[in-house]
Amino acid sequence: MFANLQIDDVLFLDIETVPLAPSLEKLDETMQKLWDKKSRNFRLPDQTAADVYERAGIYSEFGKIICISVGFIKTKDPFSIRLKSFYNDDEKLLLKDFSAMLQKFSSSKREAVLCAHNGKEFDFPYIARRMIINSLQIPGLLDNAGKKPWEVRHLDTMDLWKFGDHKNFTSLELLATVLGIESPKDDIDGSMVASVYWANNDLDRIVRYCERDVITIARILLRLMNLPGIADDSIESVTQI
């Protein structure tokens, strides 16, 4: 499964997203109509588009990224992880800074790899789409257009856990728990991010939550690879990666 994979070539990441506006009525009229049309696919008969607007953040056309946290493992004994977060109310600035870091990381690693939980279905395509929407070039490590499957340098801990069982969905919290890894959901969870951002204006709290997810993803991959884990005192926040 992990032939030729070097753990220090892996950049772990997690993103946090929110709806584009604090409420449906704050969107421009055209986007309100498009959300009404989109949400008909999943809302209940007695629900309105406004009732389900808190779900808008999971769709890249109706949401934005407010935080991307990344981490990479240093393999000196003992293993440690270095974390860096990119967060901003201005999504374009956030994505520019993240893109610059990603270019630097991939150029310094012969076999650079991205790893996220459910990243193939959510994090990786969401970032790529939002870069296009913001008129930014997609970094090579994220851009899988025209690539053969074995050329795409993306790992997904949820996908790895499936072992080919495509109907299976396992949350990060559940997978961490069954593997005996401390759950990252000790403060907020994904369903609370939009209200913490729009109602409480507490971006720092969201960043801490995002970083805990990155640590958990790294610990899960190490466990799947039967490699040493990361102790709490081996976690470091840095200004540059």
Image (cartoon, rainbow, N blue to C red):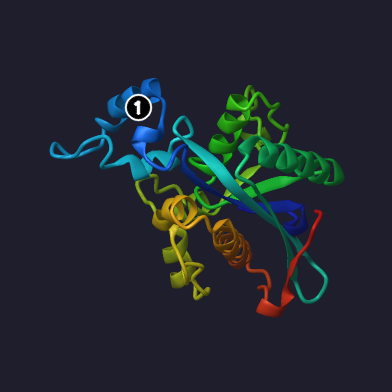
> Residue drawn 45% across and 71% down?
177
x and y percentages locating residue 231 in the rendered image: 67, 78
> Residue drawn 58% across and 26% down?
133
x and y percentages locating residue 235 in the rendered image: 71, 71
> In the rendered image of this protein, does residue 106 appear above or below residue 187?
above
Report the number of numbered marks. 1
x and y percentages locating residue 88 in the rendered image: 64, 46
Outermost residue to the right? 108
Locate residue 119: give its quadrant. Answer: top right
Q: Is residue 192 left or right of residue 36?
A: right
- Disc 1 is placed on an element classified as helix
Locate residue 59: give its quadrant. Answer: top left
> In the rendered image of this protein, does residue 204 appear above or below residue 33?
below
Locate residue 207: give its quadrant. Answer: bottom right
x and y percentages locating residue 145 in the rendered image: 62, 24
Q: Choose between 130 and 22: the one closer to the eye.
A: 22
* Residue 170 in sight: no
Amino acid bearing label 1 = Gln
Q: Is residue 42 left or right of residue 199?
A: left
Q: Choose between 132 and 118: the one closer to the eye.
A: 132
* Residue 102 in sight: yes
Q: Choose between 98 and 152: the one closer to the eye.
A: 98
Outermost residue to the left? 46
Crowd class of label 1 (few under 14; some 14 to 19; many from 20; radius 10 Å)? some
> Residue drawn 67% across and 38% down?
95
- Residue position marked by numbered label 1 in the rendering: 32
> Residue drawn 63% across and 22% down?
146
